[in-house]
Amino acid sequence: MQKKNSLLSLLNSLALSTRNFSRLKTQYSRVVKVIFISCVIGVLSWLFTPSAVALTQIKLSNISYHECPKELAQGAVTSGTTMVANCFLVTGKAQNGTNKTVYDADIFGRIYDANNDSVMQNRTRLGSIKEIPPGVSDFELRISVPANQPVPLKLKQFKAAGFSAPVRR
């Protein structure tokens, strides 16, 4: 009799275990399907993403400056004030290492006077270059420096970054 009861209880627990196992199997198979589908979507979106308008770094070299011609310098004032200013043209070479034209490249750099004081405090964006074709090309940038800051100027950390398609219209 005890053998029968223990055999019955063993069969009952086995049936319960089988039902629980099939429930767990169903739940885990759903989770595995969701993970698999998510991975497939991720890989496909990575493979078939259209090319973005990416920021392209431009190397600037041979940076120098000279005074503006009289017609450009006439009436120069510093931004936000009516203080007299000196006009300078910063020139150099821009190297576009890609095989595409770069558009709307912002020029960044630091400019110091003869006393190592910043000419443009809290400002590193100095201007922009509209278009830079592949290869090396010349660029020119006009700046205004307060007349009370002594020259020669020191031009440091110049670089530029632009886009592979026009962004400003």
Image (tube, rainbow, N blue to C red):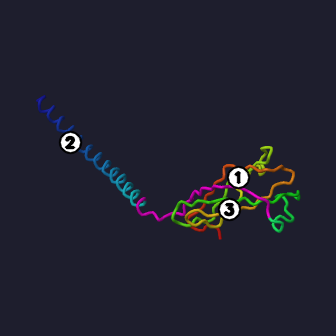
Give the labeled residue for mark 3: 128
Disc 2 on helix, strand or loop? Answer: helix
Mark 2 or mark 1, which has the lower sequence index? 2
Specify few, some or many for label 3: CA neighbours under 10 Å numbering under 14, 14-19, or 20 or more. Answer: some
Specify few, some or many for label 1: CA neighbours under 10 Å numbering under 14, 14-19, or 20 or more. Answer: some
| Magenta range | 46-68
Image check: 99 left or right of 109? left
Give the labeled residue for mark 2: 15
Q: Nearer the viewer, residue 120 or 167?
A: 120
Q: Amino acid at mark 2?
A: Ala
Q: Amino acid at mark 1?
A: Thr
Image check: 52 left or right of 4? right
Q: Which mark is residue 124?
A: 1
The structure residue drawn at horizontal position 22% and vertical position 43%, both measured from the top left corner, is 18
Q: CA distance from mark 2 to mark 1?
A: 75 Å
Residue 56 magenta: yes
